[in-house]
Image (spheres, helix red, strand yellow):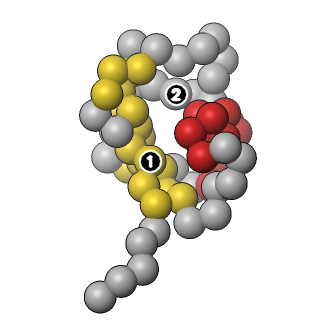
C-alpha cells in the first residue's frame, strides 16, 4: 500500500512511476513532475522506479 497525491493506492505488481503517470494522465507526461517520499524522481528514472511510499504527481500551471 502507498499513497498517490494523498489518497491510498494499491499498485499493480511491478507498477512503475511511468506506468502510474500514463494511467493518470492518459499518456501525456508533458509538464508533469513526480516525487516519491518528498524527493523528485527524474523523468529518466520513471520506468525503473517502483510505485512505493508517498507519491505526488504535479502539473505545471501558468498564471500570475
* Residue shown at the point (45%, 25%) measured from the top left: 52
Element at label 1: strand
| Depth order, front residue of 45/59 | 59
The image shows residue 12, relative to residue 21, as above or below, that is above
Is 33 placed above or below 5 here? below
In the displayed structure image, the side of residue 3 where residue 26 appears, left or right: right
The residue lying at 42 percent from left, 72 percent from top is: 61
Whole-percent x, y for residue 18 in the image:
66, 40
Which residue matches tag 1? Answer: 57
Quadrant that contains the N terminus: top left
Image quadrant in which you'd find residue 14: top right
**Could you tell which of marks 1 and 2 lies nearer the N-terminus?**
2
* Residue 62 seen in the figure: yes
Other residues around mark 1 within 10 Å, as few (<14) / some (14–19) / many (≥20): some
Residue 59 rendering spot, x and y as whole percentages: 46, 60
- Gap in angstroms between the C-alphas marked 1 and 2: 12 Å
Q: Residue at x 52, y 27 (%)?
A: 51
Amino acid at each position: 500500500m502507498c499513497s498517490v497525491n494523498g489518497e491510498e493506492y494499491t499498485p499493480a505488481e511491478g507498477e512503475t512511476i511511468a506506468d502510474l503517470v500514463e494511467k493518470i494522465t492518459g499518456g501525456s507526461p508533458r509538464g508533469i513532475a513526480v516525487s516519491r517520499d518528498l524527493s523528485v524522481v527524474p523523468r529518466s528514472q520513471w520506468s525503473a522506479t517502483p510505485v512505493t511510499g508517498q507519491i505526488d504527481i504535479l502539473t505545471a500551471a501558468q498564471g500570475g
